[in-house]
Amino acid sequence: MNIHKPGSAPGIGFGTAESRAGRVAVVSVWGDLDALTAPMLARAIRSAAQRQPDALIVDLSAVGFLASAGMSVLVDAHEELRPAVRFRVVADGPSTGRPLALLGIDALIAVHRTLEAALGGEL
């Protein structure tokens, strides 16, 4: 996988990194995903989408807090990219998976527990 780090925010412990697995773009996110950091995720997703992947996965495995602003970025990206690009999210546990399930976002967007599962799912 090639890794590119388009955005990080020193001092707030948030960042993103883009990697590729063939024709799949993976945007990994770490830190708290809230109103302050959500625009950085949106930019990272747009940057990855410009390379015209077949699928784009946002990996929230290292996110400690997922606010509604972050969830809005995910829903907006899903709407903007489909049907040309398959969109998936990696989220598990109380910090990320639970909020997505509680709001029903997991019914709209394919949410996987691990990156391996997201990469292996019908791409």
Image: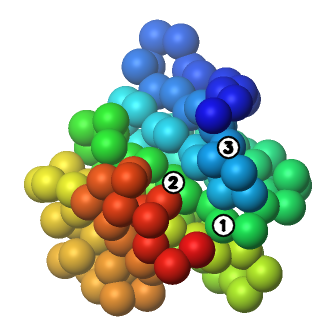
Task: Answer yes or no: is residue 22 visible.
Answer: yes
The first of marks 3 and 1 along the sequence is 3
Q: How many residues crowd around disc 3 within 10 Å: few (fewer than 14), some, or many (20 or more)?
A: some
Residue beneath disc 2: 58
Numbered disc in front, either 3 or 2? 3
The amino acid on which the numbered mark 2 sits, given as a three-letter code, is Val
* Residue 40 drawn at (x, y percent): 63, 40
User: Residue at image x 33%, y 79%?
Assistant: 106
> Which residue is under mark 3?
20
Badge 2 marks a residue whose secondary structure is strand
Quadrant into which the N terminus falls: top right
- Say which of marks 2 and 1 sits in front: 1
Residue at position x 35%, y 88% in the image: 107
Mark 3–mark 2 CB contact (< 8 Å): no
Q: Give percent across and percent down for residue 37.
A: 52, 39
How busy is the neighbourhood of tag 1: few (under 14 within 10 Å), some, or many (20 plus)?
A: many
Circle 1 residue: 55
Do we see residue 72 in this rendering?
A: no
> Can you say whether 75 is above or below 42 in the image?
below
For the rendered model, the colour scheme is rainbow
Image-based side of 66 in relation to 34, left or right:
left
Residues at marks 3 and 1 touching, judged by CB atoms closer than 8 Å = no
Hey, which residue is sitting farthest top in the picture?
Answer: 11
The quadrant where residue 50 appears: bottom right
Work out how far the residue at label 3 is from the one at label 1, CA to CA, in angstroms. 10 Å
| Residue placed most toward the observer, 79 or 49 | 49
Identify whether 1 is placed above or below 70: above
Question: What amino acid type is highlighted by mark number 1?
Answer: Ala
Number of numbered tags placed on the structure image: 3
